[in-house]
């Protein structure tokens, strides 16, 4: 596979992940956030099961207790990020959620500094300021038009940044990516399922009505998106992948406008431009060290 082909596949993946914000929101017309997460990742878990089994059979050694502990930490960060992102969509738009989620690229160097003592590059400081300005504009600025959803999705971006750092460290020690995907999905199914069965009513009609959204998020965004990422990133540079994945945010905004009729004010458009510029700046600055492939952004 050529580098161009790999990059085009990664762009397709960014489009799939950006488009996932729409079914994540529309499914909540009939499902609670927790039930949507349970059903979405149950689909991912079931479909991934045979591939995880094959990976386990081919493994040269079993996963150690320490390895399982590292995977569970990754899964906890993944769980928090997904819950905050999903609940945020009750009160924020698809466009806002997509762009505010992209702030994890700015938060990741700070998470790496805290967790692994890796110092951020010089570009991080101006990019962080630009990104925070963009987030402020996107959430309403001086007009005060921000919502609790904007705050939740921004906090979720912090959780995603922690997950990115932990994935890099975990995959270097335990090279079992499909098992990690399964552990993350299982964590959401168990934790969100326990809450949903006690707190949130559900009906068979609701599940049937939301089946297309669940299928998209569970199959395309989860299984297919992760698989394309794993294959394509073997044939391109990590810096290429990170920049391409930043396109997830404008794809989310485009799908929200086309399918849901989301409209944005001039200040919000300015905020989107500022966030996207910050993302590109932190990736293109010459002194920035190249990130490991395992540290690519997460799916929506």
Image (cartoon, rainbow, N blue to C red):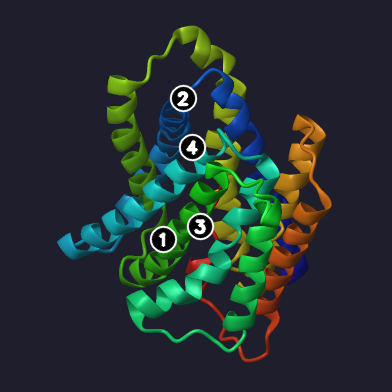
Kindly identify which numbered label has been placed on residue 190: none
Left or right of residue 185, residue 281 in this image? right
Question: Callout 1 environment at 10 Å: few (<14), some (14 to 19), or many (20+)?
Answer: many
In this rendering, the label closer to the viewer, 1 or 2: 2
Circle 4 residue: 87
What is the C-alpha distance between the residues marked 4 and 3?
13 Å
Give SS at disc 4: helix
Q: Residues within 10 Å of mark 3 (few under 14, many from 20)?
A: many
Q: In x, y percent, where is residue 178?
A: 41, 52
Look at the numbered disc 1 and give the secondary structure of its residue. helix
Real-space Cα separation, disc 3 to disc 2, in angstroms: 21 Å
The reply to whether discs 1 and 4 touch (Cβ–Cβ < 8 Å) is no
The reply to whether residue 250 is in sight is: yes
Q: Quadrant of residue 273?
A: bottom right
Q: Earlier in the sequence, mark 1 or mark 3?
A: 3
Label 4 or label 2, whichever comes before in sequence order: 2
State the residue position of label 1. 163
Q: Which residue of the protein is positioned furthest toward the left in this rendering?
A: 65
* First of labels 4, 3 by sequence position: 4
The CA distance from mark 1 to mark 3 is 10 Å
């Amino acid at each position: 596979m050529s580098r161009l082909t790999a990059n085009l596949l990664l762009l397709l993946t960014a489009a799939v992940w950006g488009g996932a914000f729409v079914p994540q929101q529309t499914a909540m017309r009939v499902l609670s956030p927790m039930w949507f997460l349970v059903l979405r990742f149950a689909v991912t878990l079931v479909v991934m099961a045979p591939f995880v089994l094959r990976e386990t059979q081919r493994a040269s050694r079993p996963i150690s207790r320490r390895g399982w502990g590292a995977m569970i930490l990754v899964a906890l960060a993944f769980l928090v990020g997904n819950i905050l992102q999903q609940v945020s969509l009750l009160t924020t738009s698809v466009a806002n959620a997509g762009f505010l989620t992209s702030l994890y690229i700015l938060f990741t160097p700070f998470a790496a500094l805290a967790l692994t003592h890796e110092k951020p590059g010089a570009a991080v400081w101006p990019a962080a300021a630009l990104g925070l300005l963009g987030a402020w504009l996107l959430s309403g600025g001086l007009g005060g038009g921000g919502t609790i959803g904007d705050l939740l999705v921004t906090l979720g971006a912090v959780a995603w940044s922690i997950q990115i750092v932990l994935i890099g460290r975990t995959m270097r020690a335990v090279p079992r990516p499909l098992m990690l995907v399964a552990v993350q999905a299982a964590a959401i199914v168990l934790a969100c399922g326990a809450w949903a069965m006690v707190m949130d009513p559900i009906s068979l009609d609701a599940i049937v009505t939301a089946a297309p959204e669940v299928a998209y998020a569970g199959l395309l965004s989860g299984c297919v998106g992760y698989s394309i990422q794993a294959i394509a990133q073997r044939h391109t540079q990590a810096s290429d992948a990170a920049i391409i994945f930043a396109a997830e945010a404008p794809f989310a905004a485009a799908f929200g406008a086309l399918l849901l009729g989301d409209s944005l004010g001039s200040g919000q458009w300015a905020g989107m431009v500022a966030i996207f510029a910050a993302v590109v700046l932190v990736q293109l600055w010459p002194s920035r060290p190249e990130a490991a492939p395992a540290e690519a952004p997460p799916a929506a």
